[in-house]
Amino acid sequence: MPVLTGNYIPPGIFKNPDVATIYSAMLRKVDLPPVERERIELSDGDFIDLDWTYSKTPPASKKLVILLHGLAGSSDRAYMKGMARAFRFRGWDAAAMNFRGCSDELNRYFRSYHAGATNDLAEVITHALSLGKYEKIALVGFSLGGNMVLKYLGENRSRPKEIIAGIGVSVPCDLAGSLGAINRMRNFVYSKRFELNLKKHLLKRAEKFPDHISKAEINACSSIRDIDELYTSRAHGYKNASEYYEKASCLQFLDGIEIPSLLISARNDSFLSEACYPFGLAKASKIFHFEAPPYGGHVGFVTSKSIYYHEKRAIEFIESML
């Protein structure tokens, strides 16, 4: 019955979910050595850029953690750097994915990424194993990237034996429900920021693919759902936004997970609906673990130290599987 209680109590003002969320996303500084960027070619002719950070402890590591960012994010986000740094000090290499179109260069195709794009993750894992050096691989995803990790682990597909564990942090397990939560008035600033960032990205895409989407259509969007209706769903083979949310949500795949996994989501995360807290599934599982601290906001598990709570927990959980 792996529902975990945890012992996270943030310092002072960081009990406030908005302070924790905003500070962690906008103000946290993470010192990390320069990354080594590698472009990998995908089977459909597109590409993904990986940013590599190597273990601080010689000799060369045989352990790799693959990191997946959230909506409108990239490998440059503080939460990605923080996790890479934490694992680096434990003797792990880290490969931080930039989803299609999320690095410094627009990807080649009209399609880009979405919450259920697990085939791209599978190709990155295959590439990592082709290097011939990694014996253990762990997956860590944040928000949308966490949905991708948990969906991948629960799908009816073959997975390499080298994958030992998966972690999801602040995951919108039910995409439609999470969108409803983000659309609440208290989250207006967050939702508007997501919308503007996505529209800025889409406007660049419209310049490259004027026959597929117009600037007028993009500017007419007034919500995240509008963008998912116009672009995310149809560019990736879904009929509409509703079908995308239904089929890409990881919630329906959690009971199929057969690799040790941990989901950490704060109870005061205003981006998540009640369906994003799968207590029942965790209680019935021997392999899927769920921890819901009362505090933490959205990927905002601040501590008084340089390592955040979710980073410490990810390392503890994954290394317990070695």
Image (tube, grey):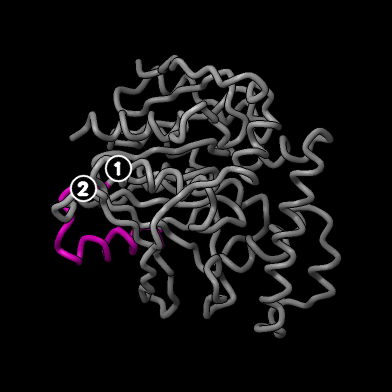
Residue 47, image x, y percentages: 43, 74
Q: Which residue is mark 1?
A: 89
The one of 301 and 236 positioned closer to us in this rendering: 301
Task: For residue 162, say whether it is visible.
Answer: no
Q: Residue at x 39, y 38 (%)?
A: 167
Q: Residue at x 69, y 24 (%)?
A: 16
Q: Residues within 10 Å of mark 1 (few under 14, many from 20)?
A: few
Q: Is residue 40 above or below residue 199?
A: below
Identify the element where label 1 is drawn.
loop
Q: Residue at x 56, y 65 (%)?
A: 237
Q: Residue at x 43, y 17 (%)?
A: 6
| Distance Cα–Cα, label 2 vs label 1 | 7 Å
Asked where in the image residue 316 lies, by quadrant, the reply is top left
Q: Which residues are magenta?
A: 119-137
Residue 235, image x, y percentages: 61, 68
**Magenta span includes 121:** yes
Magenta portion: prevailing SS class:
helix
Residue 41, image x, y percentages: 36, 76
Q: Amino acid at mark 1?
A: Phe
State if disc 1 and disc 2 touch (CB < 8 Å).
yes
Q: Quadrant of the C terminus?
A: top left
Q: Which residue is mark 2?
A: 57
Q: Report the side of 84 relative to 60 (left or right).
A: right
Residue 218, image x, y percentages: 79, 68
Q: Is residue 124 above or below residue 77?
A: below
Residue 301 is marked as none
Q: Quadrant of the N terminus?
A: top left
Q: How many callouts does the rendering have?
A: 2
The one of 91 and 69 positioned closer to us in this rendering: 91
Identify the element where label 2 is drawn.
loop
Asked where in the image residue 175 lies, by quadrant, the reply is top right
